[in-house]
Each structure stands twice: as structure tokens, then as C-alpha cells.
Image (spheres, rainbow, N blue to C red):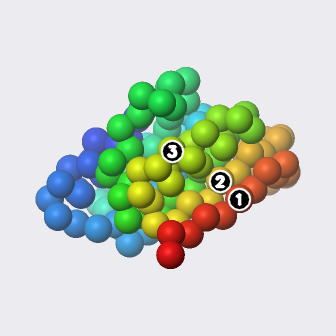
Amino acid sequence: MQGHERIQQYRMDGHKINRLIFLNDFPCLTDWPDGTEHPTISVAGDRINTLDLRFLVGMAVSVSSEDEQRAKDLFQACIDHKAKFVIGNHYKGPRVADIQSSWLQIWRNK
């Protein structure tokens, strides 16, 4: 997992992130320079059942993967780690412009 360290520290310092956190199952930029942008995490190649996602408690998360089962597993992992809102997406095609979704699900903790 890449990009989570700053988010973890921010949360441990008692702050809540008021932006959507992107949890991407592909290599991507994961810098979060000043806390004003959307934090982005890459879990490309990671075993989902070993990820420590406790920093997602109470957060809104967007999950994206080119692999449908991994997208669903990440989606469930976010729910299991008590995220407040999760959008899960399995997409086909390039990551820019012509994205086609074959699975999309939204979950909200009430």
C-alpha cells in the first residue's frame, strides 16, 4: 500500500478528512501535498486481506480496480473498516476518457 502514511498520521493527530479518499488498485500518484486535495492510495498488487485500513473509519472512500473481484473485495474491506460511505467501481478500458464501468456499487453507513 502506498500513500497511506500521511493519512494515518493526519488521523492520529485527531483530524478528519472532509474529502473523498481514492483507493486505487493500480499504480498512481499518491502524494497528498498540503491536505487540501483528495488523498489517493495505491494498493496495486497488495493482498487485500492484509491491508490495515483502520484510518478509513468514518471516511468517504472511492474504490477503483480493473479486476471486478478485487474491486468488490476492496469495497467490502472499506465497509468492514467502518468507512461511512463507499463507492466501488470495476472498470474496463483506459483510466482516462473512455472508462466503461461493468460493476458499480454505492454503500452508505446509516
For the view shown, which residue lies furthest in the bottom direction?
110
Residue at 41% of width from left, 50% of height from top? 81
From this viewpoint, which residue is outermost toward the left? 13
Residue type beneath disc 2:
Gly
Q: Position of residue 96 (x, y in %)?
A: 74, 49
Pointer 3: what residue? Answer: 77
Q: Which residue is mark 2?
A: 88
- Callout 3: SS: helix
- Disc 2 secondary structure class: strand
What element does badge 1 sit on? strand
Residue at the location (41% across, 34% down)? 51
Direction from residue 67 to residue 37 in the image, left or right: left
User: What x and y, as percent, mark residue 79?
Assistant: 50, 54
Could you tell me which residue is drawn at 48 percent across and 30 percent down?
49
**First in sequence: mark 1 vs mark 3:** 3
Distance from Cα at disc 3 to Cα at disc 2: 11 Å
The N terminus is located in which quarter? top left
Q: Label 3 is placed on what type of residue?
A: Ala
Give coordinates of residue 68: x percent, y percent: 74, 38
Estimate the x, y position of residue 98 in percent, counting from the top left: 84, 51
- Which mark is on residue 29? none
**Which residue lies under the disc numbered 1?**
105
Q: Amino acid at mark 1?
A: Gln
Total numbered badges shown on the rendered structure: 3
Mark 1 in CB contact with mark 2 (< 8 angstroms):
yes
